[in-house]
Amino acid sequence: MKRFLIGLIGLIGLISPVCAEEQADSIEGWQFTTIDSVGITPVKDQNRSGTCWCFSTIGFLESEILRTKGIELDLSEMFIVNHNMLDRATYFVRQYGEGSQYAPGGSAYDVLYCMEHYGLVTQDAMPGIRYGDTLPNHTEVDAICKGFLNGITGGKVKKLSPVWREAFQAIWDTYLGKCPETFTYNGKTYTPLEFKEWLGLKESDYVSLTSYTHHPFYTRFALEVPDNWRMDQMYNVPMDEMMQIIDNAIRHGYTMAWGADVSETGFTRKGIGVMPDADHGADITGSDAAKWLGLSADDKRKELTKKPLPEVEVTQEMRQKAYDNWETTDQNGKEYYMVKNSWGTAKSDYKGIWYVSRAFMAYKTNNIVVHKDAIPKDIRKKLGIK
């Protein structure tokens, strides 16, 4: 099965649990009532750009600013993208185009790294669109940059000129605009790093956590996926403790960035993410077995996500098997999580919010990024986090 990663490559979100006992937010077959929620900024649209990793993590940082300073800010994603693409290209070329890949994807850590080393700016200071569209469209610039890098690492160039980075940077500057050295916010002039300092955001305050058995629990390791090219060291915890951290964060008013695989049958484009027992699809949907076998994958997805159905019971072993096999590519009182996506408000029945079941969260989470204070004290102690 092809691996699709959202978060390390796509959907990353701001998570709050909901149940479905009284109608509050609903479509046919689904009804949700919010139990706990945390502050988020408006949903954005990454459109035709592979920058969900940036949109999601910037959304997370915007919620952190809401939590700590009570200010609703619209931060520039493309300021981060511009810096990050040059960093990634430099790494790719140093590897001679081997042992790594240059791609538009990334991770939450890319945003935290760029924030710490380059700062942050507002959307007004760098809108990041200079090519006539109203929403990001990186189809052309991605193709140009890939061709550029393949050209200088393909074997014909024996010695790099000292200006290749300048030439590469000029491509991104042309499409996104140059990163401002200073900008004005509320009448005061800041450098990007000064603005980050004023906001009180520190990379060291945020930790990435995952849960896999091919590394020891309560240690750190770099998750082996191509877009973790900076080799971010994630804390490894048992699945149950990962879920405990998520729930504890929500209860105490913290959001988080979520990296997940959304290639499962139970994840829809309409705003639902569940883990129905697809192996028993005919039984749980009440369908004729022969007719069920004749349905296409898309039709089976529609039938399995029309309403809440019995879900699989996720185990640590299931998570590991899915990872090793490249698979990690309601009105019934069950708890779900609210996830802010970056696909705009028109592509979901819930105006850009996804409702993700606890089973889906446990099974398909690749990693989460959260403020260290949101982690329960006993787990922090096991991890050596102060």
Image (spheres, rainbow, N blue to C red):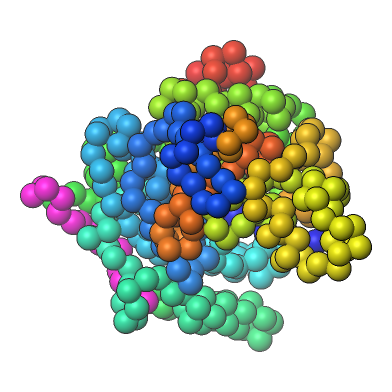
Residue 50: image x %, image y %? 52, 65
Q: Relative to 12, say whether 94 is above or below.
A: below
Is residue 21 found left or right of 111 in the rendered image? Answer: right
Residue occupying image coordinates x 80% and y 50%: 286
- x and y, in percent, of residue 150 in the image: 62, 79
Depth order, front residue of 62/34: 34
Q: Position of residue 310 (x, y in %)?
A: 75, 39
Point out the stretch of residues depicted in magenta.
174-188
For residue 313, side relative to residue 13 (left or right) = right
Task: Give the percent coordinates (x, y) of residue 106.
Answer: 55, 57
Q: Is residue 322 visible?
A: no
Residue at point 58%, 67% (across, down): 103
- The quarter holding residue 380 reads top right
Q: In the displayed orientation, state which residue is furthest to the left.
A: 187
How many numbered callouts? 0
Q: Decide whether residue 337 is among the magenta residues.
A: no
Q: Nearer the viewer, residue 229 or 291?
A: 291
Most extreme residue toward the bottom is 156
Residue at x 57%, y 77% (from the top left corner): 146
